């Protein structure tokens, strides 16, 4: 087998388009020169379109989770209470980050596969008559369980209470509809290595006017993530520290691809891939971890594995050329996951489903070969006719 | 003119070798898979060789200055006193970072062009009879003034006092001799975009056993930079957050180049380039900002400009295809700088000197064309005969 060619169907990092890979080979430039300023301006404008915001989108050389820290240390004060709304492992990690940074964190956890219920968040906030809760933290999309939260409705109930609404859209933004300004989101953060089709290493974050006002009152110790420093540089089309220039070139190339497809087109492609993947999984007789089709994720499908998921993944990877993801934390022995975001097309989903089906068969689980792909093809055909 | 070809002679980011650029185009991989573990292991071992340490070298997706924060928040406690030894702009920035993070910072500043005097540091530490000073912060190499500090001697006096010695070697490590373990350095940090010949975006940091012990007592709030989390992952050849995989490939390629040349060979090349550059500058009748040849930097030469340095740089860049750096902060109108580190060879220094000389002439300053290059050639010839 040509093992070098392997289809990466994990929920990030995602495959890199050749245009993006090539962009990174451009010669190094002076980060204080005009050429970088032009690059900065184009990338910044492109990001504002993808975030659907008129606010600046700041770029940190960092992993996506650096954005969790940037969101918190720029807007809050030591000991402040925040409400962590968690539907999975990434929710738990942001919760732990907030705790480690010295905040008082109340938790509202949902079962694996459940989406966050806006009504329950509203109830919890209604109990907070003293307005102790300064911010609500929530994932837009939780890849560990394959669930997308209804951020629009959640934002509405949080705005009624008055807390800041902070959204981790690391695995959502650029694939799933999100309207930062129209939905009244106060902080939106993401990474470039998911739907934005870049290699990992850039953390992207935007703050509403309300969040920026909170920042002026915030006394959390901060240096690297300091909003004031990054904003001052932003106005000069620079960064306070050396920017990850090659990754800016990558992001420039990927944003151009998104513009060519249109953001609405990108959203529609992900909606189709999600529907195809779920139809294929169900056709194999398997169960989705997501409890409700309406809140199942269009960027990552979590499948309850009828046999050892590690064995399924190993066969798929080594014999069938498709890389699936395992489960995280408590779900490690229970599920496998199919990522379908970024530089991924419906045909890739067919290939992933075929490999999943064959891997299950090779692991001794009774499946009828061909059914999963056929079911997904039917979804695609309906979409093409539609 | 073929403006796309331009010689980047600034003190970072530095030119990218073609092998390094090509490495970044490799397909994306699963950061939790075996392929990444192998990459991680090779890069980690290579970094230990360059740091001259048996301690782990941790890699953060971050700008080099992220290392300043990582050094401080992992080893100290809120309100602790640290001594900032500063010989230029980067010293001042680390000082400000420490202040912003809630530390009490005493300052020992030296004039631009001066190196830090170990005797004066020893005097200052001798006054600290209560052992209030928990750490001493110092740059190995200060590109803003073109000066290299005698870190070995400084470490000796700091160890006598008992404080931790923390070294920012962003523009030193991999070009200038540094022996983390043999010199007893407690924290050494650098970035990959300087002597290590990679694009910006990776912050590298190592801690001595003493520093790691301090970390266990440290109660500074931390999440992204948390040593415990990164060390726990290190043991599994992973990172707590998604690693900047393409930049790891870049670093793997550049470390292989360093191994092929040998680290001692890399040091010797930089020593030669520094000597050539200074000889050329002096042959033009110009003054170095560095006050003492013995502590002049071999990675960056700061030159007192006899005419407007911005005009010199503009002519060099636009008409002669060579990019020089300006001065920082108060030195912006006084100096220009020639970077000579990383993927840079003696012939590049000749070209930079030729362009500097011609730019000065074109700006109306009387120089005898050819003298600078000839002087540098003489230095190179002696080295070849040597």
Image (spheres, coloured by chain):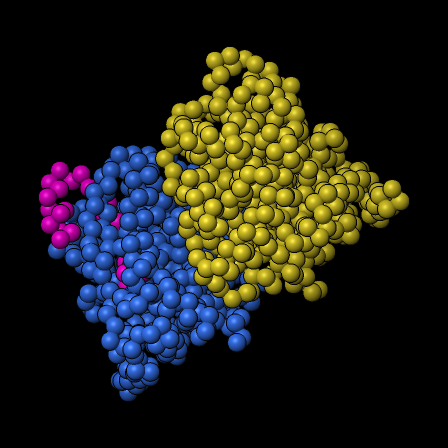
Chain colours: A yellow, B blue
Q: Nearer the viewer, residue A99 or A215?
A: A215
Q: Position of residue A328 (x, y in %)?
A: 59, 39
Residue at horizontal 27 percent and vertical 55 percent from the top: B88
Q: Is residue B123 shown in magenta?
A: yes
Q: Using the rendered image of the protein, determine whether residue B367 is visible from the camera's viewpoint.
A: yes
Is A196 on the left-hand or right-hand side of B367?
right
For residue A261, side relative to residue B139 (left or right):
right
Q: Quadrant of the C terminus of chain B?
A: bottom left
In the image, residue A374 sits, relative to residue A95, either above or below, namely: below
**Extreme residue toward the right, this view:** A385
Instruction: Give above or below for A105 relative to A68.
Output: above
Q: Which residues are magenta?
A: B120-146
Where residue A116 sits, quadrant-wise, is: top right
Residue at (58, 19) in percent of width and height = A160
The spot of residue A9 in percent (x, y) is: 68, 49
* Residue in the image at 72% along x and 50% along y: A261
Where does residue A108 sit, x and y in percent of width and height? 56, 23
């Amino acid at each position: 087998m040509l093992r070098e060619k392997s289809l990466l169907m994990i929920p990030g990092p995602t495959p890199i388009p050749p245009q993006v890979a090539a962009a990174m080979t451009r010669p190094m430039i002076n980060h204080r020169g005009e050429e970088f300023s032009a690059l900065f301006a184009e990338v910044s404008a492109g990001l504002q379109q993808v975030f659907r915001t008129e606010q600046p989108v700041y770029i940190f050389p960092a992993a996506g989770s650096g954005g969790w820290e940037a969101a918190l240390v720029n807007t809050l004060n030591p000991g402040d209470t925040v409400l962590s709304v968690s539907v999975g492992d990434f929710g738990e990690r942001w919760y732990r980050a907030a705790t480690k940074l010295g905040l008082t964190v109340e938790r509202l956890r949902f079962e694996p596969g459940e989406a966050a219920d806006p009504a329950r968040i509203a109830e919890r906030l209604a109990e907070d008559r003293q307005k102790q809760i300064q911010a609500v933290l929530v994932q837009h999309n939780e890849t560990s369980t394959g669930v997308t939260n209804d951020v629009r409705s959640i934002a509405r109930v949080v705005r009624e209470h008055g807390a800041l609404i902070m959204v981790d859209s690391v695995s959502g933004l650029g694939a799933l509809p999100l309207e930062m300004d129209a939905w009244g989101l106060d902080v939106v953060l993401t990474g470039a290595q998911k739907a934005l089709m870049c290699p990992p290493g850039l953390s992207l974050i935007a703050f509403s006017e309300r969040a920026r006002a909170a920042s002026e009152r915030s006394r959390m110790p901060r240096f690297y993530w300091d909003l004031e420093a990054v904003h001052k540089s932003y106005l000069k089309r620079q960064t306070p520290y050396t920017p990850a220039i090659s990754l800016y070139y990558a992001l420039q190339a990927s944003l151009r691809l998104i513009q060519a497809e249109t953001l609405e087109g990108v959203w529609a492609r992900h909606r189709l891939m999600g529907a195809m993947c779920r139809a294929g999984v169900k056709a194999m007789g398997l169960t989705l971890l997501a409890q409700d089709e309406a809140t199942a994720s269009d960027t990552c499908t979590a499948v309850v594995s009828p046999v050892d998921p590690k064995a399924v993944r190993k066969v798929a990877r080594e014999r069938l050329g498709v890389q699936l993801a395992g489960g995280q934390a408590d779900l490690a022995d229970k599920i496998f996951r199919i990522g379908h975001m970024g530089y991924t097309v419906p045909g890739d989903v067919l290939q992933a489903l075929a490999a999943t089906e064959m891997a299950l068969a090779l692991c001794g689980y009774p499946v009828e070969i061909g059914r999963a792909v056929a079911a997904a093809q039917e979804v695609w055909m309906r979409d093409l006719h539609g």
